[in-house]
Structures are given as structure tokens and as C-alpha cells.
Amino acid sequence: MIADEGWVGRIMSWLRALSALIVVNLLIVAGALAGAVVLGVLPALSAGTVCLTMLRDGDGTGIVRRFVAEYRARFWRANALGAPFAATGVLLIADTLVLSALPQPVATMLAVFTWVAGLYTVLALVAALAIDARYRDRILPTLRFALGLPLASPLMTLVLTGTLAVIIASLLALPMFIPLLGLSVPLFVGGWFVDHRLAQLDAHHPRAAALAR
């Protein structure tokens, strides 16, 4: 009987965690739409990162209220922090669109560059969101730290890249879950890897964000 209650408890915990991830995912989508997408995506991702950090710490209460508060408080800051990543994304999309008009050798080289730059941009953005949620430092030091972290932590970058690839492949294989978990799960896992690395750095330095200065 005790064993059964233990299994039931675990199942309920997993279901609560899953429902919380779904709620955060829907909040991110709603936040993006509230800011007309262009101005809403980055604040929504930033507020979502804070809520997902709460979930990783075992606090799943008041998610909606916390998201709304963080979204409002971080609106302009998140857009300023994410502006370089947004600009890079636009350039990479433009590169992708012109690939078909280029000669084959050049198109292949540009495609490889675009994929590598896109991956680095995603990893640096995830790092920037996690760093900002953890330290709330000035924007320029946060950006420098986020841009350098994937290069300075190759093991984290390798494992995180592989994990995100598996998550994306799984979501593409089960597309019905994309509207429910397509943003929150990659952000949850990516934030966990980055936050774990930051904790390791903090073990050797009083404040890891000070490395960016």
C-alpha cells in the first residue's frame, strides 16, 4: 500500500510539473501576442525563464501572477537585451532566403555558416535569459557574459546542443505537443544547463557575472 502511494505521489508530481510547463508555454505565447510579437517575444521569454527557474527550484505556485509581474517589469529591458539576437536572427533568415540564388559551392558554405551562427545565437540567447534571471546585472555585461559562455564552456555547449536536438526532433515527431510544450521544454532544459554551469562558476568566484566585466 505504501509503495502504491509512493508511485501515485510520483505520478501526481510529474503531472503537476507537466501542467506547469504547459501553463508557462501558453503564457509565453500570450505574452508574445500581447506585445504584437515584435516587442512581445523577448519579454515573454524572459518572464517565462523566471517562472521555469521557479519550477526547477520546486516552486510551482503563483506562476501566472509571477509571469505577469516579470513581463511588465522586464518588458523594455528584455527587448534591449535581446535586440542583438533579434537582429542576428533577421540577418540569418535573409541569408537563408538567398541561398537558392547562389552557385552551389557558395550556397553550401553559406548554409553551413548560417546553421552554425544560428545555433550559436540560440545558445547565447538561452544563456542571456538564464544569466539575466539569476543576476539581473547591467545589460552590456550580461551580453558579454552570454556571448562568451558557450565558447568558454564547450562541454556544456556540446551536451546542451545534443539535448536540444533530441527535444526538437521529439516535438517534430509529435507535432500535437508543439503548441503545448514547444517553447517551455527547450527553455526549461536549456536554462537548467546554463544555471548549473553558473553555479559551478559561482563555486570558484563570488559572483560569476563579474567575469563579464
Image (spheres, rainbow, N blue to C red):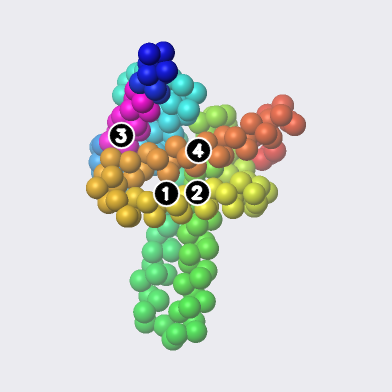
Q: Give left or right: position of 23 versus 83.
A: left
Q: Residue at x 53, y 55 (%)?
A: 120
User: Of callouts 3 and 2, which one flags the residue occurring earlier in the amino acid sequence?
Assistant: 3
Gap between marks 3 and 4 measured at Cα: 16 Å
Q: Amino acid at mark 2?
A: Thr
Quadrant of the image containing the N terminus: top left
User: Of callouts 1 and 4, which one flags the residue occurring earlier in the amino acid sequence?
Assistant: 1
Q: Which residue was labeled with disc 2?
A: 163
x and y percentages locating residue 69 in the rendered image:
36, 23
Question: Residue 198 falls in which quadrant of the image?
Answer: top right
Gap between marks 3 and 2 measured at Cα: 20 Å
Identify the residue at the far front of this view.
Answer: 1
Q: Are marks 3 and 4 in contact (CB under 8 Å)?
A: no
Q: Which residue was labeled with disc 3?
A: 22
Q: Which residue was labeled with disc 1?
A: 167
Q: Amino acid at mark 1?
A: Ile
Question: Residue 140 falls in which quadrant of the image?
Answer: top right
Point out the frontmost of discs 4 and 2. 2
In the rendered structure, which segment of residues is drawn in magenta? 11-29
The answer to whether residue 116 is magenta is no
Gap between marks 1 and 3 measured at Cα: 15 Å
Q: Residue at x 37, y 39 (%)?
A: 184
Q: Which residue was labeled with disc 4?
A: 191
User: Of callouts 3 and 4, which one flags the residue occurring earlier in the amino acid sequence?
Assistant: 3
Q: Secondary structure at mark 1?
A: helix
Point out the frontmost of discs 1 and 4. 1
Task: Examine the residues drawn in magenta and state their main secondary structure.
Answer: helix
The answer to whether residue 19 is magenta is yes
